[in-house]
Amino acid sequence: MALTTPDLQALEEQVPRDIARTVTRGDRIFRTLCASAAAVSLFIIGGTALFLAIKSIPALQEAGLVSFFTTSVWNPTVGDFGVLGLLIGTIIIATVSLLVAVPLAIGLALFINEYSPARIRRILTSSVDLLAAMPSIIFGMWGFFALQAPLVGVASWLNLHLSAIPFFRLSEPDAPLLRSSFIVGTVVALMIVPIITSVSRDVMAQCPRSQCEAALALGGSRWGMIKEVLLPFGKAGITGAVLLGFGRALGETIAVALIIAFTIEANPYVLEQGGGSIASLIAIKFPEAQDLEISALIAAGLALFGMTLLVNLGARAIVRRTQIAA
Amino acid sequence: MLERLFAEHRLQLEVDVHMSLLDERPVDETPVPEPQDPELIEEQVPFRPRALVRSERIEILLAAAAGVTGSGVMCLLFDWTHVLTFAIWALLIFLVSIYLLARDSQSPIVATDRLITTLVWTSGGIAVAVLAWMLGYVVVKGIAGLNYEYLTSDMSKVGPLDDGGGVFHALVGTLEQMLIASVLSIPIAILTAVYLHEIRGRLAGIVRFVIDAMSGLPSIVAGLFIYTVWVLQGRGPSGLAAGLALAILMIPTVTRTAEEMLKTIDDGLRESALALGAPQWRSVMQVVLPTARSGLITASILGVARAVGETAPVLLTAFGSSSINWSPFNGPQADLPLYIYQLLRQPNPAQIARAWSGALVLVLLVLILFVLARVIGERGARVRGGSR
C-alpha cells in the first residue's frame, strides 16, 4: 500500500465541531451542587491551616516562636517547648525509609512492568495493593514483634563491617540496638513502597514502546534498554514518586509511636535505640496532655502539616508535569 | 463463526471496539470463551527479548546450587540459625556466581543484565514474602484468642491480667464510625469527581491542587483538625468526631479513584445523551454515573479500607473506651485499631494476646473489603468490555 499525502480538505472536515449545549435551570442547580461539594475540600484544607494556627498561638507565645523551632525540650509544667530534635528525627526516619524503599520499589515497578510473566504479575500487583491497604498499626505490631530480632542482627553487622561510614556508627560499642530509627525506618519503608511503586509504574508505562523495542532491536540487553531508555524517560516522574513516598514517611504516626524508644533530643546514631518524630510525639503525649501542652502539640502538628504539604505538592507537580508532557 | 474467530484472537487482534458490541449481545448456544486474564487485554504484555537457552539454564542452576551450599556451609560453620541470614548469604553468593559465570561464557554486558534481572526478581520476592510473613504472623498470633466470646464481649469488667474480655465494643465503634465517615465523604467525593471531570468548572484547577494536598495529609493532622474545631468546642470526644476525621481522609482517595473511573466512560455515551436532548444533569445522573457504578463502588470500598485501619485520628477524636458505647454522638468510643493500640501500650501478655486477636479481626475486615473491591471492580470492567 502506497502512502498518500493527506488531503487537507478532508483533514479539516475531521476536526470535531463545537458542541453547543443549552444550560437549563436543572443544570445550574446541579453545577452549584457539585461545585459546593468540591469546595468542601477547600474549606477543609484552609480550615486545617487556620484552626491549627489559632490554637497553637498560646504555646508559641509561651515558648517563643524562634525557640520552638531551635531547641529540643518538652517541659509542659513551665511551658518550655522546642521541637528541633523531633524535626531532625522525623527527617532521619524518613531518610532511612527512603534508602530502603526506593531500590525495592523501583525494582518492583520494573519487575511488574518489564520482567514478570503475566501470571506472576497478577499476584504481584495484588500483593502491592494489599500492602497499601494494610493498616499502619499492623505494620507497627509486626515490625515490633517479628522484625526487630532480624533487623538488630543486620544493624550489628552493618556497624561491625561498615562503621567507617558515619551513618553506621554507635555512640559506644555495646549500645542497645532495639527500637532504633533504623528499625522504624525499615518498617516505614515497607509502608511507602506501594505508593512509590504504583506511581513509578504509571510513569514508566508511558514510555513509548517503540523506543524500548528499538533499543532491544539494536542489540541492547534488557538492562541496557532500561538504563538508556526507560529510566531517563521516567526520571522526573520517579523523582516525584520518591518525594511522594517521603511525604508519606514524614507523616507516619502509629508504627513509629509503637516501635521507637521516644526521645525529645535528636539521636544522630541511627542504628541505636532512641529517636522520635513529630507525629509520634503527638500520638504519645496527647492522651495525658493538658491545656498548654495540647496547644504545643497542635503547634507541632502545624509544623508537620506545613512540611508534608510542601513535599506533597512539589511531588505532585513533578508527576503531573511528566504526565502532561507524555 | 465470525464471533468465534474474534474471540479466539482477541489478544492478538485488539479489536476492542468490535468486542464491546459483541459483549452486549445475548449469549448464544455456542459459549464464547472468556479470556482468562482481563489484565492481559488492558495492559501490555511484557516484551520478552529472548528465551533462555540450555547453557544459560545450566548456569542458573549452578549458581543456585553454589548459593545454597555455600550459605549452608557458612551457617553450619558459624552457627547461624536464622532463616533470613541463610537467605541473604545464599542470594549474595548466587549473585556473584551468576555474574562470574555469565561474564566468563558470554560478556560483561550479559552478566550485568543477568545480575539486574536477579535483583529485580528478588525485589518482587521480597514484596510477596513481606506480605505473606505479616499475614501469617498475625494469623498465628491471633487465632488462639479468637472465639465467640471474644467477638461478643467488651473490656469493661476485665482486669488487665484476667482472661476473657473481647472486641465487641471496638467492632461496634468501627462500624458506626465507618458508616458516618462513608455517608459524609462518599457523596462529596463523587460529586467532586463529577465536578472535576464532567463539569470542569472554573475551580477545577484549584480543587485538584487541594485534593492533591489532602491526599498527603498525615492522618494525625486530620485528627488534630477535628479535635480543634469539634472536640475542643465543648462537644467532647465522640464516634461522630472520629467519623468526621476519617471522612477527611476518605475524600481524596475516593475522589481520585472515582475520577479515574469517570475517565474510562466512553465519550460516545455522553454525546448520545446530549444528542437525545438530555440536559447535563440528566446525562450525568442517568447515563454516566450508572455506567460507572461498579467503579464508583470500588472507589468507595477502597476509601473505607484505607480509613478503617487508621488509629491516630481516632485517638485524638474518640479517645477510646473499654466498655460499649452504642451512641456515636456522645461520649468516648473505641474502635478496632485504637483498641489494639491501647492494649499494646500495656506491657503484659494477656493484653498483648488480646491485641493480636484484635489485629486478626482487623486484617480479616481489610481483606474482605479488598476482595470485595476487586470482585466488583472486575465485574464492572467486564460489563464495560473494551469500550475504553
Image: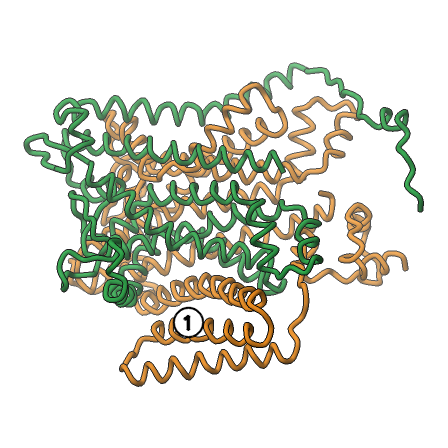
Residue positioned 48% across, 23% down in the render: A39
Residue positioned 53% across, 21% down in the render: B203
- Relative image position of residue B311 (x, y in whole percent): 32, 46
* Of B349 and A272, the residue lying toward us: A272
Chain painted orange: B
Work out whether residue B154 can be spotted: no
Residue positioned 29% across, 79% down in the render: B80
- Horizontal side, residue B31 vs residue B304: left or right: right
Q: Tell me what hue chain A is rendered in.
A: green
Q: Which residue is mark 1?
A: B92
Q: Quadrant of the C terminus of chain A?
A: top right
* Of B384 and B281, the residue lying toward us: B384
Can you say whether A166 is above or below A284 in the image?
Answer: below
Colouring used for the render? by chain
Return the chain for callout 1. Answer: B
- Relative image position of residue B243 (x, y in whole percent): 37, 37
Bin the neighbour count of mark 1 within 10 Å (Cα to Cα): few under 14, some 14-19, many 20 and up.
some
- Relative image position of residue A234 (x, y in whole percent): 55, 45
Q: How many marks?
A: 1
- Relative image position of residue A13 (x, y in whole percent): 87, 25
Q: Amino acid at mark 1?
A: Leu
Q: Quadrant of residue A172?
A: bottom left
* Of B259 and B239, the residue lying toward us: B259
Work out whether residue B280 can be spotted: yes
Residue positioned 78% across, 30% down in the render: B272
